[in-house]
């Protein structure tokens, strides 16, 4: 970083929302911006290939593994919740699914806020469209002028095709566009990958939004640096203290400090800076700058439970990354830009409501392989299929709290999965749907055995125990710094994302979400970053 340089804005964190906000503040509005990211500037080259991310899901190279506090309702288990650690945030390491959620999600935000800040679906749609270069071309729901490449997979597994046919056999309609007029139904998901030059590669937020600004002196990026505290003077945020190469440094912001460190670490940073529940801050010897009870509360995440079966034949993607298949697939990718390397493997899903309503409450994924996370390892990888029932709008709320006043320590995360009985009820209902899919053609004649839960587990008590043993995050934590009206004592930021009680400070990532969107959160994060930039520019005209 240039010594003694002041910036208009400092962004604490370099994830999806931060990259978009930085790009727009610099390119569209002419401000100077410093982005500070704790991870590296670039990930491994393998991560650029759509299929490559699977190699890193269980590794710590670009992920920080948080163990949640023990969960009584899960038999004392504390699920692992990974956090991205790279410039580009989740978009640099995720499965690249591009999903916006439902119209009702954003209209619900607007109703809750009294539409302060204009957060309805129609208000958000221009931000989604404006960021896209979508293979669906320009229409009511999609844009083509943005720099984020969005497309369908070129390669589809035979297992994915079977999944779509089985879901249709159960009466679910085919949906050609989950980000279009309706979400319910079964279909192929869009992803943030597309041709970059000669190859189909990941389109992450760094590549899409920051790389085009290389050489622009108004943007400075510091990586592998941890923001430790917001500098607050006379009730106003004026800069940050951060650690880089083991050295504590200071950077000043002439206009505002913007927090975008991710749902867990944004709440942690606020509390380390003296903004949060006063009693909790005093427990850790932190002087209170603003007593905000809602900091770290309202934590939400999509969570999922698997149904796994092996197949009689060599279907799906098992074994495609080793031996001769790996060589063949690599050559097909290099020579023809096609084949299994061009897909993440997570190609399709079913949106539906087990209770029969029109608004989906479950996103049921199909993975053409036997797969479990690193803290759930009771199934041996083989040829097969994994269905995961992901709850879209959990009622339970978790929390983020400080472990200590040491910025190097991870926060205490209480995920509270199944903390509300209705969350468990819907998940168990979807397990039944997943099992019905296995019993429906074309799967019925191809399945060798149900591995998990296993056909012997049929009674309610056994399935409840199974759900507690296997429930995992879908990597979409949100809501720890809730946006809300002044009448809500638990709201942390207002409709323009300004932190209550501290001037010159905003939060611009998924931490601000009051109610989690019904789908993967990378696209909403980027839209939040875009909208934040527009509001900030308006306020500094």
Image (tube, rainbow, N blue to C red):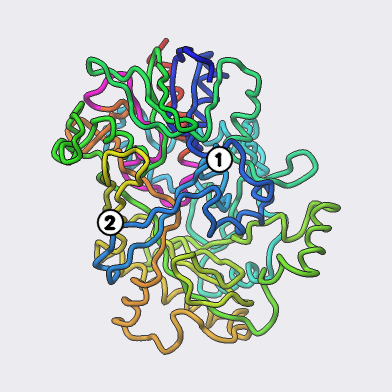
Residue picked out by circle 2: 395
The residue tagged 1 is 141
Q: Nearer the viewer, residue 412 or 213?
A: 412
Secondary structure at badge 2 equals loop
Residue farthest along the right direction in this orientation:
335
Image quarter for residue 316?
bottom right
- Name the residue at the top extreme: 541
Q: Nearer the viewer, residue 443 or 45?
A: 45
For label 1, the SS is: loop
In magenta segment, residue 519: yes
The residue sitting at 39% across, 14% down in the picture is 255
Q: For this rendering, which residue is in front, 515 or 197?
A: 197
Picture coordinates of residue 107, whole percent (x, y): 36, 40
Residue 178 visible in image:
yes
Q: Which quadrant of the figure has residue 70?
A: bottom left
Q: Which residues are magenta?
A: 500-524
Dominant SS of magenta comes to loop
Give the CA distance from mark 1 to mark 2: 29 Å
Q: Position of residue 183 (x, y in %)?
A: 48, 54
Position of 102 compared to 156: left or right? left
Q: Check the image and report above or below for 476 versus 389.
A: above
């Amino acid at each position: 970083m240039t010594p003694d340089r002041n910036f208009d804005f400092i962004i604490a964190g370099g994830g999806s929302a931060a990259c978009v906000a930085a790009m727009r503040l610099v390119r569209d509005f002419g401000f100077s911006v410093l982005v500070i990211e704790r991870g590296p500037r670039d990930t491994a080259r393998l991560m650029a290939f759509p299929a490559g991310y699977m190699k890193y899901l269980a590794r710590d190279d670009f992920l920080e593994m948080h163990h949640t506090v023990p969960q009584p309702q899960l038999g004392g288990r504390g699920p692992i919740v990974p956090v991205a650690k790279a410039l580009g945030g989740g978009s640099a390491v995720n499965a690249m699914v591009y999903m916006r959620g439902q119209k009702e999600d954003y209209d619900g935000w607007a109703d809750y806020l009294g539409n302060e800040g204009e957060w309805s679906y129609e208000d958000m749609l221009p931000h989604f469209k404006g960021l896209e270069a979508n293979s669906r071309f320009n229409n009511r729901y999609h844009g083509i002028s943005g720099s984020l490449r969005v497309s369908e997979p070129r390669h589809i597994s035979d297992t994915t095709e079977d999944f779509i046919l089985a879901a249709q056999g159960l009466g679910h309609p085919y949906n050609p566009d989950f980000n279009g007029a309706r979400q319910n139904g079964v279909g192929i998901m869009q992803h943030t990958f597309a041709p970059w030059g000669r190859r189909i590669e990941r389109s992450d937020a760094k590549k899409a939004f920051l790389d085009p600004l290389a050489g622009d002196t108004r943007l400075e990026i510091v990586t592998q640096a941890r923001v430790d505290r917001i500098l607050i003077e006379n009730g106003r945020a004026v800069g940050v203290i951060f650690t880089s190469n083991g050295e504590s440094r200071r950077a000043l912001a002439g206009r505002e400090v913007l927090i975008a460190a991710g749902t867990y670490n944004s709440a942690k940073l606020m509390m380390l800076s003296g903004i949060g529940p006063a009693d909790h801050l005093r427990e850790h010897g932190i002087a209170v700058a603003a007593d905000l009870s809602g900091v770290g509360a309202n934590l939400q995440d999509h969570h999922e439970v698997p149904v796994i079966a092996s197949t009689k034949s060599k279907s799906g993607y098992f074994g495609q990354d080793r031996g001769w298949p790996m060589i063949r697939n690599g050559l097909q990718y290099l020579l023809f830009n096609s084949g299994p390397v061009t897909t993440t493997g997570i190609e399709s899903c079913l949106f539906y409501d087990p209770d029969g309503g029109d608004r989906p409450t479950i996103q049921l994924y199909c993975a053409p392989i036997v797969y479990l996370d690193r803290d759930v390892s009771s199934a041996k990888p083989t040829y097969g299929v994994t269905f995961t029932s992901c709850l879209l709008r959990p009622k339970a709320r978790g929390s983020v709290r400080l472990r200590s006043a040491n910025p190097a320590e991870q926060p205490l995360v209480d995920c509270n999965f199944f903390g509300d009985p209705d969350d468990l009820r819907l998940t168990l209902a979807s397990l039944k749907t997943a099992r019905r899919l296995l019993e429906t053609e074309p799967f019925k004649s191809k399945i060798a055995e149900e591995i998990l839960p296993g056909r012997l587990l049929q009674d309610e008590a056994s399935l409840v125990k199974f759900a507690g043993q296997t429930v995992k995050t879908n990597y979409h934590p949100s809501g720890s710094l809730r946006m809300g009206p002044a009448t809500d004592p638990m709201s942390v930021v207002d409709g323009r994302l300004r932190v209550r009680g501290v001037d010159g400070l905003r939060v611009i990532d998924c931490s601000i979400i009051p109610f989690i969107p019904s789908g993967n959160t990378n696209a909403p994060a980027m839209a939040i970053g875009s909208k934040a930039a527009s509001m900030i520019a308006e306020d500094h005209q």
